């Protein structure tokens, strides 16, 4: 049986693509393995959203050159967004690379493998959306599942490569999504996350159109409280009162939203072509919290975008304090091919970007700790998943409905259980607790871990671009 080593970079969409690749190649007889030295096929599924992520791919690819020389018949391929972005240039740059496959052309991999003597490429100017049904998905987790509901983006933010690497916005038919989630529930999955580049613009191009909230209601009806539902990432311009009411009222829908802001400066938001201003964004946050007081809000922030002054950056810090974020992906601006920001004037020096990132992360730590301390003494519902223990197998871990990681000790608990945990410690990154009961499933649903006073609870997610 041939052996496959699959290396994934980037977002949840890339994680799901890798699960699809694994399922597709399992049908071709490939066994997924950990050790690259044993592999007959190595695939790097890549992200192009930031330069650092792209450079990691090239660095890792370079380590395989000697392995390719030593092992006769070893095939190496690059998939995903870097493959779509660079295409033939990758084959020219890396002579030991066998093929390049864009995110919309994954079904081409078996055909490329059938011609071992020929190097190949399978990318397209406008990536298709055929791959969600290419094969049974070989999921990494038996508890939580990614479910793609749409692909691509029509926004064309000036810093973003997604419209170029994943194409224009396309939505899956709702009946396909419902059937996938119904099957996941039958298999015992406890949580699904709906994926899309601007997930809350789902359904506008379907005929007849279907709104995102309509889809959420259909999903809530079929899971009937047995499965937690999350979604990522919504665009602020498409946050409506109807969506806020759905978050507050649908029992399956978790009380957490990742709402990218990118900057707190009106001028920088205009240059980014985000389609909203600072005040509009804050109005959306106020709407969400008015309807769902216990809602956790995390975000994306870019520092050092072209033209960002010290005053613009202080506006971002001020917005962070006003919103009270509990978590964020934070990055230094990274110039990307094909994007208008690449040619903008007033590029910010790297040393200034670095200083601003450090300041923003320090503030986030402070805000996170404040929010987390508000949990002390409260009992929360936790979906157990030892993956959140970060390798410490002596303790248990899981997440609240607000997506907060909780570490705790206890016996008689297995992954996938819903348990009650009393919180006795807090850090900026997670909560510590004591197991109260393993019967939390009887109390699952809205309000279980939402205190009367607002608690804003989400994962701290950080990085550098």
Image (cartoon, rainbow, N blue to C red):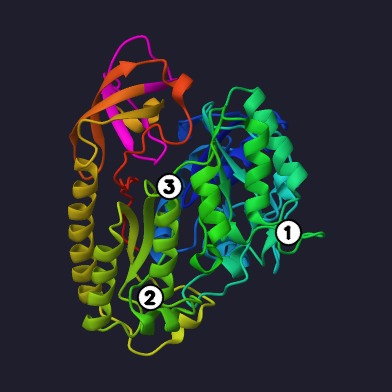
- Residue 286 is situated, as x and y percent measured from the top left of the image, at 39, 62
305 vs 272, left or right, is: left
Specify the quadrant of the image occupied by residue 433.
top left
Q: Which residue is found at the position 21% from the left and 54% from the top?
A: 367
Q: Which residue is found at the position 75% from the left and 43% from the top?
A: 176
What's drawn in magenta, residue-wise? 392-419
Say if the magenta span includes residue 215. no
Q: CA distance from mark 1 to mark 3?
A: 31 Å
Q: Earlier in the sequence, mark 2 or mark 1?
A: 1
Quarter holding the C terminus is bottom left
Query: Which residue does the numbered mark 3 point to in the structure image?
Result: 256
Q: Residues within 10 Å of mark 2 (few under 14, many from 20)?
A: some
Say if the magenta span includes residue 404. yes
Q: What label does residue 74 carry, if any?
A: none
Task: Give the overall secondary structure of the magenta segment.
Answer: loop
For the view shown, which residue lies furthest in the bottom direction? Answer: 345
Specify the quadrant of the image occupied by residue 360.
bottom left
Q: CA distance from mark 2 to mark 1?
A: 35 Å
Query: Which residue does the numbered mark 2 point to in the structure image?
Result: 278
- Residue 455 is situated, as x and y percent measured from the top left of the image, at 30, 45
- Residue 264 is situated, as x and y percent measured from the top left of the image, at 33, 73
Q: Residues within 10 Å of mark 3 (few under 14, many from 20)?
A: many
Q: Is residue 198 above or below residue 386?
A: below
Disc 1 secondary structure class = loop
Q: Which residue is found at the position 71% from the left and 39% from the top?
A: 178
Q: What label does residue 128 carry, if any?
A: 1
Disc 2 secondary structure class = helix
Camera sees residue 44: no
Of marks 2 and 1, the one in the foreground:
2
Q: Nearer the viewer, residue 368 or 4?
A: 368
Q: Is residue 36 above or below residue 189?
A: below
Q: Earlier in the sequence, mark 2 or mark 3?
A: 3
């Amino acid at each position: 049986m041939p052996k496959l080593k699959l290396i994934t970079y980037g977002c949840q969409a890339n994680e799901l693509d890798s699960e699809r690749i694994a399922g597709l190649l399992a049908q071709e007889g490939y066994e997924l393995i950990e050790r690259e030295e044993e592999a007959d096929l190595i695939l790097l599924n890549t992200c192009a959203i930031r330069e650092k992520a792209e450079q990691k791919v090239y660095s890792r690819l370079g380590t395989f050159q000697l392995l390719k020389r030593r092992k006769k018949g070893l095939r190496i391929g690059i998939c995903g967004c870097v493959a779509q972005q660079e295409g033939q240039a990758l084959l020219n740059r890396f002579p030991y690379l066998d093929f390049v496959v864009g995110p919309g052309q994954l079904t081409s991999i078996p055909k490329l493998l059938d011609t071992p003597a020929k190097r190949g490429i399978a990318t397209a100017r406008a990536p298709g959306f055929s791959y969600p049904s290419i094969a049974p998905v070989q999921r990494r987790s038996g508890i939580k599942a990614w479910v793609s509901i749409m692909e691509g983006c029509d926004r064309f933010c000036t810093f973003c490569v997604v419209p170029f690497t994943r194409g224009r916005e396309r939505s899956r038919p709702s009946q396909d999504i419902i059937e996938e989630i119904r099957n996941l529930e039958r298999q015992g999955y406890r949580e699904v996350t709906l994926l899309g580049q601007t997930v809350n613009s789902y359904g506008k191009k379907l005929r007849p159109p279907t709104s995102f909230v309509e889809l959420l209601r259909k999903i809530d009806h079929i899971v009937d409280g047995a499965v937690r539902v999350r979604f990522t990432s919504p665009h602020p311009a498409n946050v409506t009162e109807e969506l806020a009411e759905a978050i507050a009222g649908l029992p399956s829908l978790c009380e957490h939203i990742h709402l990218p802001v990118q900057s707190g400066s009106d001028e920088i938001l205009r240059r980014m072509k985000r389609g909203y201003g600072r005040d509009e964004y804050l109005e959306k946050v106020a709407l969400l919290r008015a309807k769902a007081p216990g809602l956790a809000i995390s975000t994306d922030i870019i520092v050092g975008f072209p033209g960002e002054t010290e005053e613009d950056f202080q506006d971002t810090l001020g917005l962070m304090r006003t919103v009270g974020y509990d978590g964020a992906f934070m990055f230094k601006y990274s110039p990307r091919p094909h994007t208008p920001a690449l040619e903008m004037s007033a590029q910010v020096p790297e040393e200034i970007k670095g200083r601003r990132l450090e300041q923003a992360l320090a503030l986030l730590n402070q805000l996170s700790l404040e929010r987390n301390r508000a949990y002390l003494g409260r009992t929360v519902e936790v979906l157990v998943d030892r993956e959140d223990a970060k390798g410490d197998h002596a303790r248990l871990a899981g997440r609240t409905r607000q997506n907060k990681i909780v570490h705790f000790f206890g016996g008689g608990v297995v992954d996938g259980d819903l348990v009650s945990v009393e919180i006795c410690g807090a850090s900026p990154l997670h909560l510590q607790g004591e197991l109260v009961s393993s019967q939390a499933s009887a109390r699952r649903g809205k309000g279980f871990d939402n205190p009367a006073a607002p608690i804003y609870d989400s994962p701290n997610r950080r990085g550098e671009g």
